[in-house]
Amino acid sequence: MKKVISTVCLVLVSLVAMAQIGNPITWKFTQQTIDDQTVEVQMNATIENGWHLYTMDNFGDDGPVSLAFTFDRLKNAKPIGKVVAKSSHHEMFDPMFELTVKFYEKSAKFVQKFQVSGDYEISGYLKGQGCNDQACMPVNAEIRLKGTAKSKAAVEEEPVEETTEEPAEEVSDSTEVAAVAEVEEGDLYRPVIEEMKAYENGGSNEKSRSLIYIFLMGILGGLVALVTPCVWPIIPMTVSFFLKRSGDKRKGRRDAILYGLSIIVIYLALGLIITAIFGPSALNGLATNAVFNIIFFLLLVVFAVSFFGAFEITLPASWSNKMDEKAESTTGFLSILFMAFTLVLVSFSCTGPIIGTLLVEVATTGEWLAPSIGMLGFAIALAVPFSLFAFFPTMLKNMQKSGGNWLNSVKVVLGFLELALSLKFLSVADLAYGWHILDREVFVSLWIVIFFMLGFYLLGKIRFPHDEEALETVSVPRFGLALISIAFAIYMIPGLWGAPLKSISAFAPPLNTQDFNLYENEVHPDFSDYEAGMAAARQSGKPVVIDFSGFGCVNCRKMEAAVWTDNTVADILNDEVVLISLMVDDKTPLAEPIEVTENGQLRVLRTIGDKNSYLQSHKFGANAQPFYVVVDANGNPMNGSQAFNEDPSVFINFLRNGINNFKEKK
């Protein structure tokens, strides 16, 4: 557990440090002719001072990411042996990973020999990890080289596997790049951004609505954080701190306002840092990454088990004590800022999962401001009450400190909720990679059990280690919450037979993952492949509705449950159009990689999701989901786009408008 906490802390520190750095490890790729049939590819890394690059050694599951080179496409080229490191490395015991690691500093050189003939092409990529004393960051690069051998003798090509030793890095700007495959531009991929802007679609209103929704979600998260057990101990600390400053009422009120603003600034800075590091597209990809979602699933399960009383999770006491001492010893604004940092640190074990869930929620909006807006709402909801505590410390000096059965009950209830929420993250990874271990009926069954048990706990039928003696009586509020939890569990039971369950559609897997389904008014996409769907549209003479969606897209599930189940919408989608649903987070590998240029940068599309995401951004100029467009069989837009809106009449008008324009132009 100590290692888990340390890793979490390192991640937080890394976010701050990485926001201020560029690319500390750069690569240059060259090739040297050895003889008529042999070339040597040289891969040179330049490492900034203070940074280091881990070697190709296998450090195990608990260690850093090893450097690995993969040459996945070769033409008239055959590798001779494996990648060889030409630079000496350093070796030391790393207390963070609790093992001995090997790494390079300042520079590193690697070579790989190839037997070549005729016009040859060497394509590949590398992955690894670089760190300094404050942060770690992934190292990724594409390797693209080509040339003409002096000898024309044929080279027998063999399948190329990933090297077990060392990975390679990024391609320098001067390196010639050989195309792996080409996307057929034509009309199907021709950008139509300006044509869509000609239609009046209220896109700006949708964007504004999306940001308002994110802000409200942040406020809701902040309000939830206020009642968590980790935040409660800060109240008497705040009261004690500001009681000492209550002599001058005017100055005390000014300090109270500064305290609230400090809390807001700290959380807002976190949102800005995340935005600067990831951006909307990368955050979307991270939110559907299997490793990320499984880690978050396990993290929430660990927090839930902790809240049930199995063990305690706390940051090192020295951290919060040090911040508290700084707040006491310093004066002016600096002391108030340290007090705000104390709040953030002490409350981390409860606010961390809430903040993480909020950031994942905004990942598919595609808005640059989304993380910052969400964190702003969270911070305001958390800061306003604490500013009031600071305003009136004398009225609150006798407030009950943390402890007591009521507070433990709050922890257990939060444990049940976090356990239920953790399944959402496991479901995202399951859907994106097609594992089929958590289909809809399994997910719904687990939620039914969790909320039944929550209801029984509130009624005093279940006890945990930190609970006091069995309840003799149940208070009215507690009985009401138990009634709501059990009623919610009963409400979900029809979902086992295919009922839409609109209230949990944002969390549960889609209906098409359920094997036993008695629900008849369900919309299924006609195609999940763009080219195949457009070819079918040409044959049928129907307009096309393209649905850019994602397995991890919460609002996509809401639209499918609240809007697509409307009889009129279902009839239109099933009978009058060709519906193509494209998942931007589908991790299924393409038959062969596709090389494209996006925003002046070379990009290699390796999965179906990569290709769908590129289509959405390149052709339609958008990267948020859900995103709907009506086009003809040649990819020409018939009206503007439609985003998330749970009003069926709005979606019906969008569909009718596109279909009518299609008929007129036809």
Image: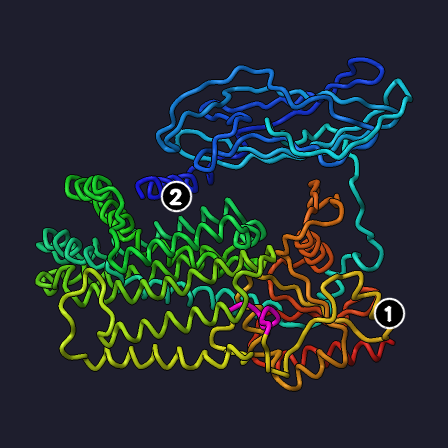
- Determine the CA span between mark 2 and mark 1: 52 Å
Name the image quarter holding residue 35. Answer: top right
Instruction: Name the residue nearer the viewer: 63 or 26.
Output: 63
> Which dot marks residue 12?
2
Q: Earlier in the sequence, mark 2 or mark 1?
A: 2
Q: Residue at x 46, y 18 (%)?
A: 90
Location of the N terminus by quadrant is top left
Q: Is residue 560 left or right of residue 634?
A: left
Instruction: Name the residue nearer the viewer: 400 or 599.
Output: 400
Q: Residues within 10 Å of mark 1 (few under 14, many from 20)?
A: some
Please state the extent of the stretch shown in magenta in the rendering.
508-515
| For residue 238, above or below residue 39 | below
Q: Is residue 311 left or right of residue 363?
A: left
- The amino acid at mark 2 is Leu
Q: Residue at x 47, y 71 (%)?
A: 444
Q: Which residue is mark 1?
A: 538
- The amino acid at mark 1 is Arg
Numbered circles on residues, count: 2
Q: Is residue 301 left or right of residue 587?
A: left
Instruction: Name the residue nearer the viewer: 69 or 82.
Output: 82
**Label 1 SS:** helix
Q: Residue at x 62, y 33 (%)?
A: 126
Query: Magenta residues: mostly which secondary structure?
Result: loop
> Residue 545, percent across and down?
73, 71
